Image (cartoon, rainbow, N blue to C red):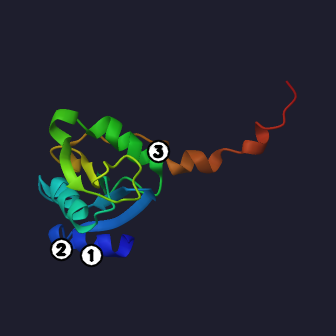
Amino acid sequence: MEANLLRAVKASVPTVLSVRIPAPFTVFISIEKRTEGQGMNAIAAALGAEMYLKNAVVVDHDINIYDTHRVLWAISTRVQPHRDIVLIPYSRGSDLDPSCTVDGLTSRMGIDATAKPSLGEFTPRHQIPQKIFDRIEPEAYLNKPV
């Protein structure tokens, strides 16, 4: 399913890097955004390509889609709901979805969690430099008598 989604999204957004299905009915998509609107295009392509999807989240290439905490961080810091969330009501969904109506209708949601207007102009994500981590010796702090 991920390979098919990657192919479908790449047809619409050539700079897509990877897709991941972390949970039922959900896809995370990593893109290298070059122009505004590519996040929404990726959402439309993914939701249109696979009827089993209900949720699509698009992030910039600096977010590891295999780390759900980072994806949630991007949603929390790069999304304004009125601008970046799209809802598609009354769409044909999967009969496997327990929240679907009896006639198989569901709603779908896309979240564009890419930096606006671009990653280069967005506040950088802060992190501890690797050379600091390399100097830390966990054994020095663990198993010490209190």
Would you place residue 141 above or below residue 94 in this image? above
Residue furthest out toward the right: 145
Label 2 Cα neighbours within 10 Å, binned few <14 / some 14-19 / many ≥20: few
* Quarter occupied by the C terminus: top right
Residue 137 placement (x, y as % from top left)? 71, 45
* Left or right of 58, for residue 117: left
Q: Element type at marker 2?
A: helix
Q: Element type at marker 3?
A: helix
Label 1 Cα neighbours within 10 Å, binned few <14 / some 14-19 / many ≥20: some
Q: Three-letter amino acid code at disc 2?
A: Ala
- Could you say which disc has been placed on residue 78 in the image? none
Give me the C-alpha separation between circle 3 and circle 2: 28 Å
Residue 13 placement (x, y as % from top left)? 18, 67
* Left or right of 101, for residue 144: right
Asked whether the viewer can see residue 113, the reply is no
Residue 143 placement (x, y as % from top left)? 84, 37
Give me the C-alpha separation between circle 1 and circle 3: 26 Å
Give the residue displayed 72% in from the left and 43% down from the top: 138
Closer to the eye: label 1 or 3: 1
- The residue that mark 3 highlights is 69
Query: Looking at the image, is mark 1 or mark 3 earlier in the sequence?
Result: 1
- The residue that mark 2 highlights is 11
Give the residue displayed 41% in from the left and 58% down from the top: 96
* Left or right of 82, for residue 54: right
- The residue that mark 1 highlights is 7
Would you place residue 128 above or below residue 7 in this image? above
Q: Three-letter amino acid code at disc 3?
A: His
Label 3 Cα neighbours within 10 Å, binned few <14 / some 14-19 / many ≥20: few
Give me the C-alpha separation between circle 2 and circle 1: 6 Å
Location of residue 85 by image quarter:
top left
Pointers 2 and 1 in contact (CB under 8 A)?
Answer: yes
